[in-house]
Image (cartoon, rainbow, N blue to C red):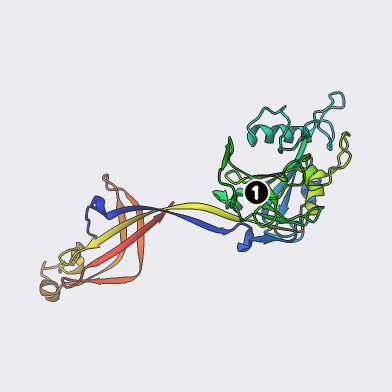
């Protein structure tokens, strides 16, 4: 084993943006949206439904792709926590959570979709973090098969100015290939995309989505109403991968001898075993270790095959660390 201190010019940091299909099995489009009967019967179902890539009740290894929730400022569409306290229900909790965390407003504020009438309810689609990685790729969203046979996307490719909220970037959803359509002036836009947190907010009034029996506190299974309306859902993820390149150089006069005495010296008499080690030494580089100033091994890079080294050769090995 031989050591050499790296110079500052031997280090290079690079950042690269990687775009990939968001869904499992490297798929960019979902056309079926199975949910779990176990979850439906469980305590989380009044708040949200998880959507999988395959039937989780029949196939082992099903993975969550996204979740659907329904929020209502009056608590409609879900059972009350306490029959004596009107308006406090799972849909009211969901409403307050998203208005506060996503829209950056007080949990009692009305959601605003830009229409002339006040919006008091919405659907929220929350993409699984493992699926969108760092962010949703703007312009890749395509949801079709909604109740009005509308295909929606975001307006990131045509808007000259990006809006920012407490949840990061905010894009408006519309119809058409560039997301520049709206439903009507009364209902407002179709919704919003928050790519940095993996959240899509949909406006039921503009899209004509089913929100059954608003004004009642019956469990109306509203998250599943949206899932049943979906025909296809396309999405791509985006992440910035930072790479640290380390250039390890072995010049012609370096690393030609082994520091292991048994490699070339007789243990009994201390003589050189092979004359080639005097005139023409040869070694083989098989791995590179990265040490700090305390002589602690931090990383090991393995070569695909041994690299022959002698006085007539120089080697340059580029080590790449991704993080």
Q: How busy is the neighbourhood of tag 1: few (under 14 within 10 Å), some, or many (20 plus)?
A: many
Q: Is residue 26 left or right of residue 189?
A: left
Q: Residue at x 65, y 30 (%)?
A: 105
Between residue 114 and residue 32, name the one nearer to us: 114
Between residue 186 and residue 108, name the one nearer to us: 186
Q: Residue at x 22, y 52 (%)?
A: 5
Between residue 139 and residue 24, name the one nearer to us: 139
Q: Which residue is mark 1?
A: 127
Q: Is residue 315 left or right of residue 60?
A: left
Q: Is residue 131 left or right of residue 32?
A: left
The image position of residue 235, as x and y in percent, is 63, 56
- Please tell me whether residue 254 is drawn above or below residue 277 in the rendered image: above
SS for dot 1: strand
The image position of residue 7, as x and y in percent, is 23, 52
The image position of residue 257, as x and y in percent, is 18, 66
**Can I make out residue 96 in this image?**
yes
């Amino acid at each position: 084993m031989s050591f050499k201190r790296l110079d500052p010019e031997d280090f290079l940091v690079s950042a690269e943006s990687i775009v990939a299909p968001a869904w499992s099995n490297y798929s960019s489009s979902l056309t079926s949206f199975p949910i779990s009967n176990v979850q439906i019967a469980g305590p989380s179902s009044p708040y949200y439904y998880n959507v999988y890539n395959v039937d989780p009740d029949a196939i082992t290894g099903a993975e969550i792709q996204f979740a659907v929730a329904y929020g209502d400022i009056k608590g409609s569409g879900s059972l009350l926590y306490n029959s004596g306290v009107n308006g406090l229900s799972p849909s009211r909790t969901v409403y307050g959570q998203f208005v506060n965390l996503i829209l950056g407003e007080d949990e009692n504020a009305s959601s605003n979709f830009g229409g002339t009438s006040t919006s008091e309810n919405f659907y929220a689609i929350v993409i699984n973090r493992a699926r969108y990685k760092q962010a949703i790729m703007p312009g890749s969203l395509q949801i079709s098969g909604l109740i009005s046979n509308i295909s929606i996307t975001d307006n990131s490719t045509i808007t000259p100015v990006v809006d920012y909220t407490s949840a990061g970037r905010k894009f408006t959803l519309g119809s058409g290939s560039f997301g520049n359509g709206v439903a009507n002036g009364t209902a407002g836009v179709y919704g919003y995309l928050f790519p940095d947190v993996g959240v899509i907010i949909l406006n039921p009034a503009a899209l004509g989505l089913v929100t059954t029996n608003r004004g009642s506190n019956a469990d109306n299974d509203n998250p599943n109403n949206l899932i049943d309306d979906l025909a296809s859902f396309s999405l791509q993820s985006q992440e910035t991968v930072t790479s640290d390149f380390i250039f390890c150089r072995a010049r012609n006069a370096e690393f030609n001898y082994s520091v292991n005495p048994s490699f070339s010296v007789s243990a009994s008499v201390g003589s050189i075993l092979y004359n080639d080690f005097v005139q023409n030494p040869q070694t083989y580089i098989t791995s590179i270790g990265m040490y700090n100033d305390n002589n602690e091994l931090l990383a090991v890079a393995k070569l695909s095959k041994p690299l022959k080294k002698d006085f007539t050769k120089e080697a340059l090995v580029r080590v790449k660390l991704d993080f």
